[in-house]
Image: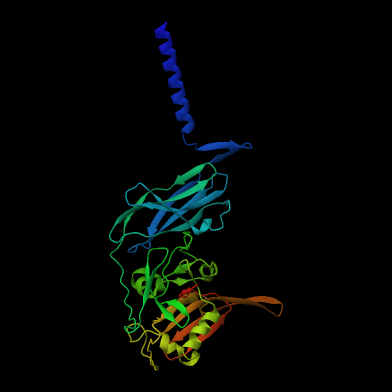
Amino acid sequence: MGSKNELLFFSLMICIIVAFIIGCKKKDSTIIDNIVIELPTINTTEIRDIADIQAVGRGILSSDGGSGLFACGVCWSSDSTNWKFGKSAFGLYNNIIKIEGDFNFTGSITNLLPNSTYFARAYATNMIGTSYGKTISFTTTAPFVAQINFNPTVNYDFIHDQDGKTYRTVAIGNHVWMAENLKAITYNDGISLDRDYDYCWYNNDLNSNDATFGLLYSWGAVSSGKVCPVGWHVPSMEEWGILSDFLGGWEVAGGKLKETGMVHWTSSDSVATNASGFTALPSGVYALNGYSGKSLFNSVDSSGYYWSASSHTERQTGVLITRWGFVGLDFKTESISFMVWPFTPYMAIRCVKD
């Protein structure tokens, strides 16, 4: 009798264990309202723009599984465990997003260590779970070093951005400004900027331009209000005007803002003193060329263009036209120019403290 009870007991325990295992097993599909919902189909296509403390992953989604996506992006790890997840710009609006056909996206990989090996893979999450692309290993480079001639008589402070990069800052009048161009490839809420639409490097040359000249950003990145580190923002045209007035007006402010010497600036007819410590650089622009009809990189070594957060829309002959504001510095003059264009180039950003 005892042996029968023991057999029954062990049989029951086996059934419970099997049921528990089956119940805990990750579902690859489910049926809702007679519709089969599956895990997303995704692949990791490449790891690009590998630098000292960052890289960019690219993924391709060929199916959302039929339920729409809650998030997608790239995750990374130093040992194929303890993955860190970054959301791509595709998930910026926090909606359930449907895709049709193949969808390519990029994802920022940040806060890495130089000369180190990492693993990365694309991921996508829908209502029943998360799918991963293949894992790709990569090795970061030696530390990037900025070649910038700061004013040795100015007392600079330092801040870190959301990617772990360090910047000098300087107080000018009642405002505190970055004394270096922004280099962030994520928003300050951790969502990735899109490598193909939100930013680029001059001539797409990361190695030559990132550390010194920083990135050239689109209006989309500027208008997000989240591209600068927390507690900082892209200056308005009014704030640029206050800076100019404090330095003696637009006619002479440029000379007091520009880095001295001819390492970066073309030989100038005016004297660049960098008296303010701002250390403006000729980082150039990526903009539409009126002759070719194509966007081209130009003006590096001769002009520095910096975004403002200001824009306005006006009606002309029944058509609404939006104009975007920015400032410009040129190697030929000591002045600072306040400009508005009816199209949006890619330009540098200097953040100002809130």
Q: Position of residue 184 (x, y in %)?
A: 43, 67
Q: Position of residue 18 (x, y in %)?
A: 45, 25
- Height in image: 304 above or below 134? below
- Residue 40 vs residue 144, the one in the foreground: 144
Q: How many badges with numbers are in the image?
A: 0
Residue at (30, 61) in percent of width and height: 114
| Furthest residue in direction front, as rendered | 174
**Left or right of 64 in this view: 161:** left
Where the N terminus falls, by quadrant?
top left
- Residue 13 vs residue 347, the one in the foreground: 13
- Residue 162 location, quadrant: bottom left
Q: Position of residue 131 (x, y in %)?
A: 46, 45
| Residue 58 in view (yes/no) | yes
- Height in image: 285 above or below 140? below
| Furthest residue in direction right, as rendered | 318
- Residue 153 location, quadrant: bottom left
Residue at (39, 49) in percent of width and height: 83
- Residue 48 vs residue 102, the one in the foreground: 48
- Height in image: 194 above or below 245? above
**Left or right of 23 in this view: 144:** left
- Residue 231 vs residue 199, the one in the foreground: 231
- Height in image: 316 above or below 191? below
| Furthest residue in direction top, as rendered | 1
Residue at (44, 49) in percent of width and height: 43
- Residue 167 location, quadrant: bottom left
| Residue 322 in view (yes/no) | no
Q: Position of residue 232 (x, y in %)?
A: 48, 70
**Left or right of 78 in this view: 172:** right
